[in-house]
Every structure is written in structure tokens, then in C-alpha cells.
Image (cartoon, helix red, strand yellow):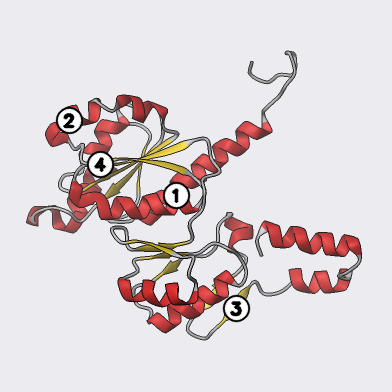
Amino acid sequence: MDEDVLERLLEDVKQGTVSVEDAKQILDDTGYENFGFARIDHHRTRRKGFPEVIYCPGKTVSQIVKIAESLLGEQDTLLATRADEDIYTALKGSFPRLEYNREGRVVYTPIDSSSDRSILVITAGTSDIPVAEEAVVTAQVMGCSVERLYDVGVAGVHRLLDNKDKMDEATVIIVVAGMEGALASVVGGLVGAPVIAVPTSVGYGASFQGLSALLTMLNSCASGVTVVNIDNGFGAGYAASQIVHLAEQRNEDHSCNCSGGCGHDE
């Protein structure tokens, strides 16, 4: 149950159209719907601030559609990752408003950004873009403003330095890189914002399908660099969005219109 549904329920109780006993029964439900092959967590939004996300690999198209029907029956937001064209076609047939990011392989509900703070997604190379786009769409669906800065890896680091102003303006930076994964350390040493590093499986044999980049990022000497798993654009986009929303919430909690003496920063 998301906040809007909960607010409507409480309003119905206030107006007397729903009894206290019925409201308690609604709130005390298990919070998930059991299909046998999946248990859909409808209380995820209440706990995490965002609904359950569908990870498509390993599921049949019919299973994915069934899960989507359950999720969209409770809220307006859907995010399905690692989705191919067949999955998108099936979902689009049932839910015409859904859109598809082909590079990132993400089916999603388009949402306008509600954030004044931005997430900057940087890639070392063009081959890293599919993972980056998964991060971009995830953050956008979670209500964040996102900018892209692609193909600025250390093989031509002047391309990155030419965009220092963009890095300085970002609240959170996601760095997506394969090969040796050095770009995350470079960015981490240039900015004060938190950096979320995403190693990709892009690279030649000795990169070991992203293990080389992962180890480089984990061993970064730049402070403030956090690392997610190989090719995990979704995880990076989700974490970056949580940071942005927490920063906004803290800003709202500490905002003040007084002329001084309240203890808030002027």
C-alpha cells in the first residue's frame, strides 16, 4: 500500500465510509499476494519508498505479465529490468502507457522528475552505455533528475575534465566503467559528491568479465567511492535515488524562514 492509498483509507475512516475494524483488517493483511511462483510484496513502498521491481531473467512472459498486473493493481509505478522485446510487447499490450528503454532493457512507467537535485551518470566508453541506461531509467522512475555524460574514459581524460562543471553540480555521481575500471577513482578524486561505481563486463580476456574493474573500484584510493556489483546499473540508480531523496528530506526538515537565532544554518 503506497502513501496515497493509505491517505485515502484514513480519509474514508475519518468520513465514516470505512469502519475502524475494516481499516484495521486492511492494514493487518500479509502485505503480499501469493501466486505460487511468486509472492508479490505490496508493502515494499511503505518500507522502502518504492514498489517491488521485476527482474525478468528466469521468468516466463506470462509470469511477468501476471506480476505486473498485481503490482499495477496497487500503485501506478512499474519497473521491470533486463526485459527483452517480447516482454515489452506483452506488457505494452496490457498496459499501453508503459515505455521501453532498449539500450538499458528496462520497461517502465514514465514519471516526471520531482527533484531539484541531479544525478550524473558517467561512462568510460560507449560499450558501457547499456548498464548506464539501466541506472538512468531506474533513477528517473524514482523521481530523480538525471544527466548523462558518456564516453569520457581515462584513455582521453581531457574529455572528462572539460565537463568538470557538470560533475560539480551533481548531488550524486554514478560512474560506469569496464576494462580496468580506473574512471571511478579519477572522478572520486575530483568531486565532493558521493560516487557510486559500477564495474561492467566490458573488456578483453584479462578483464575476467568485469572482475578486473570490480577489484580496481573496490581498491580505489579516492574517498567517497562506493561500489555495486558487476553490470548492476539498477542497484546504482536505486542507491543514488535514495541519497537524493534523503538529502531533500533533510533540507525540508531544516528549512526555516526566520531571521536568525533558531539554530539553523543561515
Judged from the image, the secondary structure of the residue bearing numbered disc 2 is: loop
Judged from the image, the secondary structure of the residue bearing numbered disc 3 is: strand
- Which is more foreground, mark 4 or mark 3? 4
Q: What residue type is labelled 4?
A: Tyr
- Which is more foreground, mark 2 or mark 4? 4
Q: Which amino acid does label 2 sit on?
A: Val
Q: Which of 243 and 109 is in front in this view?
A: 109
- For the residues labelled 1 and 3, the Cα–Cα distance comes to 26 Å
Neighbor class of circle 2 (other Cα within 10 Å; few <14, some 14-19, many 20+) is some
Report if the CB atoms under discs 4 and 1 are less than 8 Å apart. Answer: no
At a point 59% along the width and 54% down the height, the residue shown is 49
Tell me if residue 24 comes above or below residue 37 in the rendering: above
- For the residues labelled 2 and 4, the Cα–Cα distance comes to 12 Å
Judged from the image, the secondary structure of the residue bearing numbered disc 1 is: helix
The residue tagged 4 is 150
Q: Which residue lies furthest to the bottom in this view?
A: 36
Residue 199 seen in the current view: yes
> Residue 59's image quarter?
bottom left
At a point 50% along the width and 51% down the height, the residue shown is 142
Relative image position of residue 45 (x, y in whole percent): 60, 60
> Of label 2 and label 1, which has the lower sequence position?
1
> Of label 2 and label 4, which has the lower sequence position?
4
